[in-house]
Image (cartoon, rainbow, N blue to C red):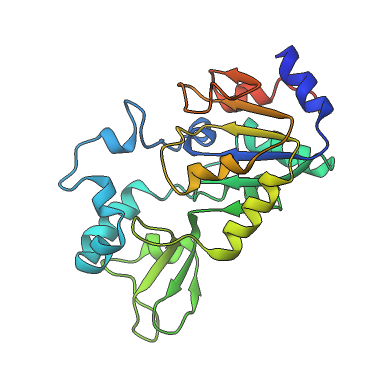
């Protein structure tokens, strides 16, 4: 923790890259751990359900899974989200690049957030483009329909879909210009998102994760533990 404090103290352009492990302390389950979403039993594998092909072929089944397993509107930001928001307010954090779709960074007050996989809080009509809130999806039945009759799709990146261009550009800019990069709560197995960290060429790379990652050997500091508990011990 002393080393982490020294790294944060010396950072002038700190960037943060986070995954599902950042939100587990808020009660949102992760995906690939032993008790994660992808290791539970379903009629179809979650990776199949959360694909663009499945959304088109079996939309009712998609939304049944999506409402039960992907929406956590009552979740509150945890210590990690709050610490990062404060770091940004102090002018020390350049931005957050997240694989999460829960919107908790914004709830905590962070502004410069690049959501690589979209957000459950944004939903749009595939016909007219009208946007709808999370509650519209949650409270609807079957395929949610716009007033124009078009299907309403969550603004999340499904397997088989491309990442948003401007979001990718902003994320790469933040990471490539940073002198300190904190990678936290991610197994670094989902591409292309996991490849973003390869753009970092700054001074210190910090990895905070419950399990080992492919970046551990390259990092200046590796901490195996909970993200919120770790970051909240660092004085800004």
Question: Image point 83% across, 26% down: which residue?
Answer: 9
Quarter of the image that includes the N terminus: top right
The quarter of the displayed image where residue 96 is located: top right
Instruction: Please indicate whether residue 225 sits to the left or right of residue 63 in the image.
Output: right
Quarter of the image that includes the C terminus: top right
The quarter of the displayed image where residue 41 is located: top left
Q: Position of residue 110 (x, y in %)?
A: 70, 48
Q: Position of residue 163 (x, y in %)?
A: 48, 60
Residue 5 in sight from this viewpoint:
yes
Q: Position of residue 51 (x, y in %)?
A: 30, 57
Name above or below for residue 147 compared with residue 140.
below
Q: Position of residue 92 (x, y in %)?
A: 81, 39
22 vs 5, nearest the viewer: 5
Question: Image point 37% across, 57% down: which residue?
Answer: 158
Name above or below for residue 142 compared with residue 17.
below
> Please, which residue is most extreme toward the left here?
43
């Amino acid at each position: 923790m002393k080393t982490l404090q020294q790294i944060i103290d010396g950072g002038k352009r700190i960037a943060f890259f986070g995954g599902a492990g950042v939100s587990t302390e808020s009660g949102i389950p992760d995906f690939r751990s032993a008790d994660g979403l992808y290791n539970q039993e379903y009629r179809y594998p979650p990776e199949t359900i959360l694909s663009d092909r499945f959304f088109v072929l079996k939309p009712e089944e998609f939304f049944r899974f999506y409402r039960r397993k992907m929406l956590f509107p009552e979740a509150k930001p945890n210590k990690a989200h709050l610490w990062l928001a404060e770091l940004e307010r102090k002018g020390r954090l350049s931005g957050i690049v997240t694989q999460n779709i829960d919107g908790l960074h914004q709830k905590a007050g962070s502004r410069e957030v690049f959501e690589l996989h979209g957000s459950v809080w944004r939903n749009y009509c595939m016909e007219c483009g009208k946007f709808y809130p999370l509650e519209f999806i949650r409270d609807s039945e079957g395929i949610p329909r716009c007033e124009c009759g078009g299907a309403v799709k969550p603004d999340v990146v499904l397997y088989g879909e491309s990442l948003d261009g401007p979001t990718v550009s902003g994320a790469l800019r933040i990471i490539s210009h940073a002198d300190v990069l904190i990678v936290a709560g991610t197994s670094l197995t989902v591409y292309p998102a996991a490849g973003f960290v390869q753009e970092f060429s700054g001074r210190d790379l910090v990895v905070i994760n419950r399990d080992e990652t492919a970046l551990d050997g390259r990092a200046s500091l590796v901490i195996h533990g909970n993200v919120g508990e770790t970051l909240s011990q660092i004085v800004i």
